[in-house]
Amino acid sequence: MSDKITQRLPKWTWLILPVVLLLGSIALFFATNPLEPLGVQAPPIEEVTVERTVLDEEGIHLTVRVNGSEPVKIAQVLVDDAYWEFTQTPKGSLSRLSTAKIDIPYPWVRHELHEIKLITSTGATFSHTIEIAEPTPAWSLQRVGAYILLGIYIGVIPVGLGLLFYPYLKTLGSKGLNFLLTLTIGLLAYLFIDTLQEGFEISQQTAGVFSGNLLVWLTTGIAFLIIFAVGRRGGQAPEGLSLATYLAFGIGLHNLGEGLAVGAAMASGEAALGSFLVVGFTLHNLTEGIGIAAPLLSRKTSFGTFVNLTLLAGLPAAAGTLIGAFSYAPHWGAILFAIGAGAILQVIVEVGVFLTKNAPSKSWFTVPNLTGFVLGVAIMYGTALLVAV
Amino acid sequence: MSPKFSRKFFLKTGLFSGAATLLGSLFSGLGQKDQPTYNGEQSPKTAAQNKGHGAMTTMGQVDHQRNGFDPHQMLTDWDTGNVSTLPNGQTLREYEISAIDKEIEIAPGIFFPAWTYNGRVPGPTLRCTEGDRIRIHFINAGSHAHTIHFHGIHSSSMDGIPGTGPGMIGPAESFTYEFDAAPFGCHLYHCHSTPLKRHIHKGLYGAFIVDPDPERHPEYEDTARSRLLGTKENERWQEFIIVMNGFDTNFDNDNEVYAANTVAFAYQHKPIKVQHDQPIRVYLINITEFDPINSFHLHANFFDFYDHGTTLTPTNENIDTVMMCQAQRGILEFSFEDFEPGKYMFHAHQSEFAELGWMSFFDVVNKDAEISV
């Protein structure tokens, strides 16, 4: 009988009815306050997260995001344990998830640490530490050029140099190809873990409501699935140039994240990035170029292709240094790193598939292959020591 | 960072600078628009070198009316009790003190869930003369068990601590503390319930001033008379009670706010007016929790100090800073006679406490102006 009723009613009834009932039950809940017997009467839960800090000649400027069971009112601001003048825009109470700008005309001291504390009307305090006070770089053509150049140094140049090994690698034969592929997988495994870790690190700075770690995991998974699906849209795994392009794309996203970290660290004065460090990055990322070259060994490749691959893998580093230096909120940073991790995971899978397909015998788990993998990880780890910021 | 990217660096890498400029023009549309730009590669100025030097203070105003007490009125608000004479001729002073839970505004916009005596922090300033019979009717209208423990001489059962006499007085219970006021001096009272730290820093404390009886101190009769409230000799003194306290607003056992009489920067925002030709006597009490000491430092002047106020001759002459542990107190005497009228600062000389609210001013005026505290 109930079947008849469901059939007789128009289809959309079963779309509307649950929604109506949901709204009704919410209204009923608020109207009757059924939790009253539980005696819940806690003070409001508040959270204030500093998402961005700008230091300039006017003082300290913060962008804060608030979260709470009730609107949050920032009552006073302390800098280094002293109450200080400030202006808040917009003024007044801040509703859930909204952001505000706090301008503090504080005579901060260059290269020293400053601790900022925000006190809400309930007396709760939220601290933010400026590790090393350094004027935030302002937007100027010269500075933009310098940051792009930095990105080119840590991204484009090493990848290009790595690809220059191509003619030599071609002479190695099929055994050499397998070795290089496993080396690439080792390199990618390192990059995957490294990128994921960077994502988790930056997710610590996001407002709690964004569930930073979850955001990183989910974005990584979804990015992997999407890129994997795009790669296989023709019905088969990418090989040759196509695989090299995905490699360059994944590595490019990683370099975007790397550039972001370097740019942000430089802008906030946390990294005294000397020429030594730039050389370190060049060596570190050289291996990436060799990795991209590996799938191309069994085919003819034009010079223009190499240039394109180099730009695809390397240039994002320049975009990264710019974004990192000038503006980004931590949750976007976490998402960028997670997309990078997902893209790298995709090429790990596809290079793995390519490797097993091209294995001369059935067994691909051989000593040379394992050696290549371990060497790939070891080279990346070893050269990373040069760039430990 | 500018030396890293000098002109030389650009020339050395000329191969890429063309591309960099091209990309630069692509990206130059992004970024913040409202941020001031520095002049090229010039080293950017820090706030200290420029105009960015705001004031160390709180923003906004405390609503004293909502609080139910005003730190300026508190300075001279002596509670002498209901006075009567006992059959034996002794003066009897009766007080009624209730413990009340109350949210108070301790700095503009910062609200603290305090426990108070009679709805104010510090509680009423009880003032009497040595030898008076003191009777305190204590009513606990709060949500926790409280006591009143007086610093002074009394019997064990009147000590106001857990385990002797009535012990802790539960909510909706009451008790009458009774004793003779002794010794003369600047004392205090506070709740001694456990956990003690919490009961003190929540606001259960106040001043208990016992004036000397001149008849009992013939050798220093004039001094004693000048300390005794209501005498002609006392009238010319400008007397103030200052209780140094602190508030741990986030309950992490560390104070976020320090103050003289509860409200941060109250006497910085509105200085205490004093006449230049009348001597000043400050009854000073330290009840700051969590920090081992607090202090009082007077600018451009020196004072005589009477530790605990239990002597009629100074225990420390001509000092400008005095430090006190918790519950230590004393009397400061000084004068701005022959001083240029204007603002004279006084504050804790723990700079940290000063910048967290314990910062004040006297405003010395000539006698034509009126005292309006």
Image (spheres, rainbow, N blue to C red):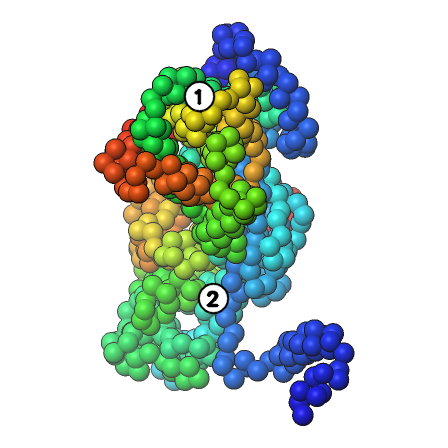
**Position in image of residue B37 (x %, y %):** 63, 24
Residue that label 2 marks: B114
Residue that label 1 marks: A163
Residue at 41%, 42% in the rendered image: A353
Residue at 57%, 82% in the rendered image: A34
Residue type pointed to by label 1: Leu
Categorize mark 1 by other alpha carbons within 10 Å: few (<14), some (14-19), many (20+).
Answer: many
Between B319 and A77, the residue placed more toward the observer is: A77
Gap between marks 2 and 1 measured at Cα: 70 Å
Between B164 and A367, the residue placed more toward the observer is: A367
Q: Is residue B14 visible?
A: yes
Compared with A271, A67 (above or below) is below
Residue type pointed to by label 2: Ala
Chain letter for mark 1:
A
Between A346 and A154, the residue placed more toward the observer is: A346
Judged by depth in the image, the label closer to the viewer, 2 or 1, is: 1
User: Which image quadrant: the N terminus of chain A?
Assistant: bottom right
Question: What number is the disc on residue A107?
Answer: none
Residue at 46%, 69% in the rendered image: B116
> Both on one chain, marks 2 and 1?
no
Q: Quadrant of residue A383?
A: top left
**Position in image of residue B228 (x %, y %):** 43, 60
The residue lying furthest to the bottom in this view is A1
Compared with A250, B16 (above or below) is above
Q: Which secondary structure, mark 1?
A: helix
**Position in image of residue B120 (x %, y %):** 51, 66
Chain letter for mark 2:
B
